[in-house]
Image (cartoon, grey):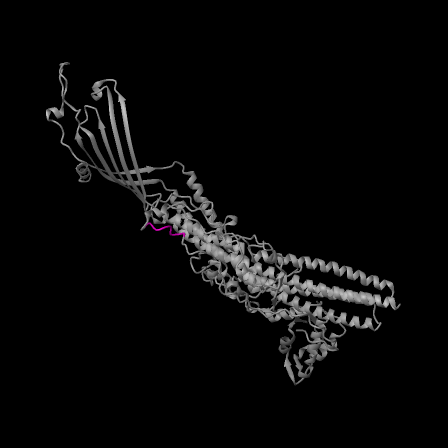
Amino acid sequence: MSLVGSKHLPCILEGLIQPSSDILNRQSITDLVGLEPGGSRYRIYIYGIVWVIESLENQVLENRTVKLRHLQATACVAMTLVSVLPQGVAQQATSTVSNQTQVSPTAPAPTRAVQNDTTGNPGLPQAPAPRATEPLYLRPTFTNYSKGKPFFPNPFKDYTSTTYEAPRLGNTSKLDDLLHNGKIYLSLSDAVTLALENNFDIAIARINLDIADTDLLRARAGSSLRGVSTGLVANTLGGTTTTITGGGGPGGTSSGSGGGGAGANGIVLSTNGSGPTPEALDPTLTGSLEYESADTAQSSPLLAGAASLNSNTATYNFGYAQGFLTGTQVQATFNNNRVTTNGTFSSYSPQLQTIFQVKATQHLLQGFGTGINGRFILQAKNDRRITDSAFRQQLLYTVNQVENIYWGLVSAYEDEQAKERALTQSTQLASDNRKQLQIGTLAPLDVVNSDSSVASDKQALIAAQTNLEYQQLIMKQAIARNLNDPQLSTAPVIPTDRVGLDRLPEEDMPVEDLVRQAYVNNPQIEQAVLNMKNNAITIKAEKNGLLPVVDAYAFYGGSALGGSQNPAEVCGFSLDPNSPAQTCAALGEGVPTVGYGSVLGHTFNNSSPDRGVGLSISIPLRNRTAQADQARSQMEYRQSQMRLQQLYTQIRIQIINGQYALTNDRAQVSAAQASRDYAAQSYEAEQKKYKLGASTTANVLQQGRSLATAENTLISSTGAYAKDRAALLQLLSSTLDRYGISIEAAASGTIAMAPIIPGLTAPKAPETPKPLNATPPPVQ
């Protein structure tokens, strides 16, 4: 805004810039009022606003000195300029200047070095790596579901079912301890403690920790992953209220609710699990026991030596198979059978036969190496860390939501009290007016106006009471699990904390320091980085999946045969039909009897070896499925890279916006407090004038409405400041550390130590209006 042409400025500048021996240089004036020479003009910076003043005659300006006694003119310039500022700008600017250096939004930006580079450019200071959520791993119970049941000393325990602990559906005893004389007296620390113990959102997210353990157990067995939901559970009602309007920075940004940077499905990716199938790391034992009795009619007795072949077969087969991370599979088979028959051409009956073979198969291209076969274990561990981080994010979100609900309850409680005071005042005025009407000193119209004001205030009080009751219910459902108790569900909740206006350290910290802190602590960045690691693992698997299947194998085995002499075996034949064939046993030409022990020994003594090597090749022509999956894995990795960079940008903007929000909120609270004090003074003065007969009922009602509006504005501004202060801590992900909340205790659901929340004060009644003073106090 240019003040050129103002009739007061020439005399001011003539007194401001004069030659003298007692001097300060013009730079001193610049330091005092922000005076910057600019050719034939002078720019004065006050409260971050540029004011341009034309220079006077050149001969006056050539002497760039000023007398000490004329420094008062400097203040005159400042007061003149401030007098044309819009109402409230001065207070806001003063608070802003004490917080951070504000410049014109259209002024050129100074050259500064990059402090937190997130793009990996060489030679630049890189953003810090995200801090891992510790300790690893968080568990709600004492059972580690990633290890399974021990095989020894009871191997049969592996085949018994697991029963997960039933959820607690009742409230903790702490909630009953807060109930006194039918009322719940609730501090913010109590609300946060109860939410950590009872809130359903946290309880549901807590089970995800154990679910992630089961995926790790599957991966250690060589199975694929089922995935874990890492998105925020946001089923708790509340967080907004009609008594808190405004607040927030100029951007109005908000953090996303997704987890792991993978959309609504959390860490479950579309290509995750594809690629070569890992070997089954859990060994498998198989067995087959069978008995068969068969009578088979023969077309010619020459084939079996009998018209009907009778055989009884007993089979005892066993197998063992196990895979290894190297891509090796080992199989061992041990087959046994015992056969009795009436056939005349079998030497043994019963006949004992054993066959043993060990075969090893190694993947040479596709499926080769520990990196491919053990990738699910690495991904499951990353998923487990993501789940821990998502649980920390859930705690930050829910604690912030409970804080918002609490400040909404505080604002509703104070709004209801303000509405009660307004109704009391209007009712008293209406009563006084009726008395004056009875003695004939007041017109009936004034009574009508005061009665109308009473009716409006009653309606406003009913709305405030309804809103207060609703906010109390919202608070109860956020900190309790069971509201079936009539006393608990109907007991009013009395908030015992109010927000203080002490400055947070974050309000005065440089933006880059806050951004660096957020980059380190933010769980979304931690999840995005881990998610990128999972995508990189998938890329390697898909690249390996492009190769043909080439397996080398080798086997070794042995077999043996034994039993007892078949009594029906024929060794001598005769062409004379009247001379029957003679059996081997009758001729003494039978085979010796070989027992099972001997048969078993011959199987493993290399007497009848079976060995070999081979190569198995499978080449899919065109290979289009593998090509599509490999290309898609690359695309998803690029998406995760951009998502991480987007998170960095979003968090930077949110941090800056959060700092702006506190600056604006503090200015709004200061202005609202001053406006409320002024409205209270005006109302009190108007009442005194009315009692002396120097005012009217309409003026008193108007001042009463102004006071009510000012109180509502102060309540809303204070609530917005409290919510934005908590929101900044959530953005920095420092809420748990600042409040002293143990993430291990939150994971277990048992809070032994109540959080210590700084910046709170006790409730206090509205201050009595200060007496009017001819000299107003200086702007704070």
Read off the magenta span. Answer: 145-151
Between residue 419 and residue 46, name the one nearer to us.
419
Report the side of 67 relative to 317 (left or right): right
Q: Quadrant of the C terminus?
A: bottom right
Q: Is residue 148 magenta?
A: yes
Report the side of 291 relative to 599 (left or right): right
Between residue 166 and residue 443, name the one nearer to us.
166
Report the side of 572 relative to 526 (left or right): left
Q: Position of residue 134 (x, y in %)?
A: 44, 60
Q: Is residue 770 magenta?
A: no
Furthest residue toward left: 588
> Residue 474 is drawn in which quadrant?
bottom right
> Residue 651 is drawn in which quadrant?
bottom right
Residue 244 is at least partly visible in this image: yes
Q: Position of residue 547 (x, y in %)?
A: 37, 42
The kind of secondary structure the magenta stretch mainly shows is: loop
Furthest residue toward bottom: 21
Q: Position of residue 648 (x, y in %)?
A: 52, 58
Report the side of 648 relative to 451 (left or right): left
Q: Quadrant of the N terminus?
A: bottom right
Q: Position of residue 113 (x, y in %)?
A: 51, 65
Q: Residue at x 62, y 56 (%)?
A: 473
Furthest residue toward right: 440
Between residue 671 and residue 740, name the one nearer to us.
740
Residue 731 is at least partly visible in this image: no
Between residue 232 and residue 9, name the one nearer to us.
232
